[in-house]
Image: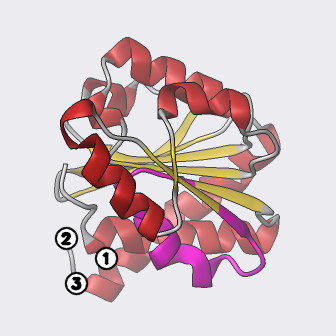
Amino acid sequence: MPAAPDHALLYTALMLRKLHELRGFGRVLDAGAEGRYRAVLADHLPGAAWVGIETAWAPVLDEFRLRQTERGLGFTDIRIAAARFAGVDLVLFEDVFEHLELADALALADAWLERSSLVLVAMAAALPVATTLPGLCCRFVHGGTAVALLSTDPGRVRQIGPLHGLIPGIVQRLTGAS
């Protein structure tokens, strides 16, 4: 999947900034897309400590590992990384679920929901997993990209509902998108 379009990033930035103002994020994990979420969102989540991880497949492994090390990202297989990261308040996935079979994607979402009160997944809207993720609170879809917010924390879910009702309209007004 190409990087999420500006509309999806704007939605993500607005939603997470509001949630951060309400309850805060101490530790944020940015997984996939070469640390793009941290680059775009760090200013919207003041005081949050960021951890970046990336994964790649054998044909590009050496080149990819070098690029990630230069950008300050750790390198790991996201499918097994959840066991090593406790105490993460927010997990952001971009360009990760597209590379997994449905069962692996669902298992990955479950594993991270056990360790975090909020998981955000940006993926192609046409993927079957885009509507079947565990803990799905809301989705924003624009230009073929879906941004899904997942949580099993009832307090977090109550915060997301009203914000999700407002933020797509704000994105539309700011971008002129329909």
Q: Position of residue 108 (x, y in %)?
A: 52, 25
Query: Which of the 4 image quadrants contains residue 124?
Result: top left
Q: Amino acid at mark 2?
A: Ser
From the viewer's perspective, tell me whether residue 70 is left or right of residue 42. Answer: left
Tell me the residue at 21%/76% (across/down): 177
Q: Height in image: 178 above or below 110?
A: below
| Residue count near mark 3 (Cα–Cα under 10 Å), binned few <14, some 14–19, many ≥20 | few
| Residue count near mark 2 (Cα–Cα under 10 Å), binned few <14, some 14–19, many ≥20 | few
Q: Position of residue 92 (x, y in %)?
A: 53, 52
Q: Height in image: 10 above or below 107?
A: below
Q: Position of residue 69 (x, y in %)?
A: 46, 61
Q: Amino acid at mark 1?
A: Gln
Tell me the residue at 80%/63% (across/down): 26
Query: Which of the 4 image quadrants contains residue 30?
Result: bottom right
Residue picked out by circle 3: 176
From the viewer's perspective, tell me whether residue 25 is left or right of residue 77. Answer: right
Residue picked out by circle 2: 178
Q: Is residue 169 magenta?
A: no
Q: Which is nearer the eye, 136 or 62?
A: 62
Query: Real-space Cα distance between discs 1 and 2?
Result: 6 Å
Tell me the residue at 47%/33% (across/down): 77
Residue picked out by circle 1: 172
Query: Real-space Cα distance between discs 3 and 2?
Result: 7 Å
